Image: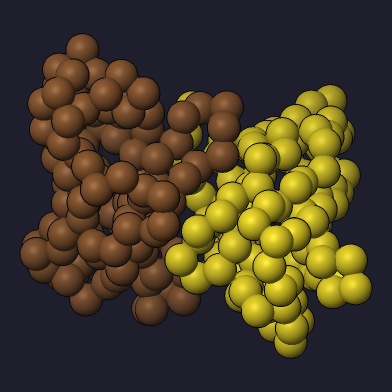
Chain colours: A brown, B yellow
Amino acid sequence: QSVLTQPPSVSAAPGQRVTISCSKSDSNIGNNYVSWFQHVPGTAPRLLIYDNDRRPSGIPDRFSGSNSGTSATLGITGLQTEDEADYYCGAWDGSLSAVIFGGGTKLTVL
Amino acid sequence: VQLVQSGAEVKKPGASVKVSCTASGYTFTTYDINWVRQAPGQGLEWMGWMNPDTGGTGYAQKFQGRVTMTASTPISTAYMELSSLTSGDTAVYFCVRGGDLDFWGQGTLLTVSS
């Protein structure tokens, strides 16, 4: 069964840049369109990136996405304290006919 | 766009629960509704989708036979019913719009406890 793998945690100082990776256990993630979600516990998750690199209206351009094939990456520049949250990658898996999520990455802004 | 879900539920093991999700700000029948849950201390888990226009559904294998997703289009409301509840179903349940998962409901806390 396909699994998306993320680092459990990342940290950086305010104003710095951070990246979060997302890889697929059994195949090239380049075959999938990857989305990224920000989740502050106790609130509704928010879509940050869809189709690998597209930002919904209202999402600052500090957030970016890419998909190299071996992994997908979420980038956040100019880190702010309010960026502290859990970040999840997700994708539709055609072989499972299901949405699969990564395990989540906790971002700490030091 | 808003998705407003029903309130918290407490159920006993073996019971069923039905969570509602009322949509506004867009044409309800033009987007699928997905259901995603998050157990305490765990990540996001996709449960399935339903098409409010056709009634078509697709469920994650883990929930097949135990989950039913329906909708009432006149009141723009989607429902997720989960049966044979166990403590492992204790989680926050979210309804989410469309294939891009672009708008999320506020979540409904389900607690399963004897």
Q: Position of residue A19 (x, y in %)?
A: 14, 40
Quadrant of the image occupied by residue A7: top left
Please identify the residue farthest to the bottom as the structure is shown: B54
- Quadrant housing the N terminus of chain A: bottom left
Residue at 20% of width from left, 67% of height from top?
Answer: A29
Q: Position of residue B89 (x, y in %)?
A: 67, 41
Position of A84 with respect to B57 (left or right) is left
Residue A18 drawn above or below residue A65: above
Please identify the quarter of the rendering in which residue A79 is found. top left
Task: State the count of labels.
Answer: 0
Place residue B103 in its image quadrant: bottom right
Residue A17 located left or right of residue B75: left
**Residue B67 visible, this angle:** no
Q: Of all residues shown, which one is farthest toward the right? A: B74
Above or below — where is B100 with respect to A5? below
Q: Position of residue B98 (x, y in %)?
A: 56, 68
Q: Nearer the viewer, residue B109 or A40?
A: A40
- Viewer-side residue, B90 vs B25: B25
**Residue B43 seen in render:** yes
Is B27 situated left or right of A88 in this image?
Answer: right
Where residue B39 appears, x then y in whole percent?
A: 57, 35
Q: Nearer the viewer, residue B39 or A73?
A: A73
Q: Is residue A59 above or below residue A71?
A: above
Q: Residue at x 62, y 74 (%)?
A: B31
Question: Residue, x 21% and y 12% (percent of image)?
Answer: A110
In the depicted structure, whether residue A35 falls above or below residue A60: below
A60 lies left or right of A7: right
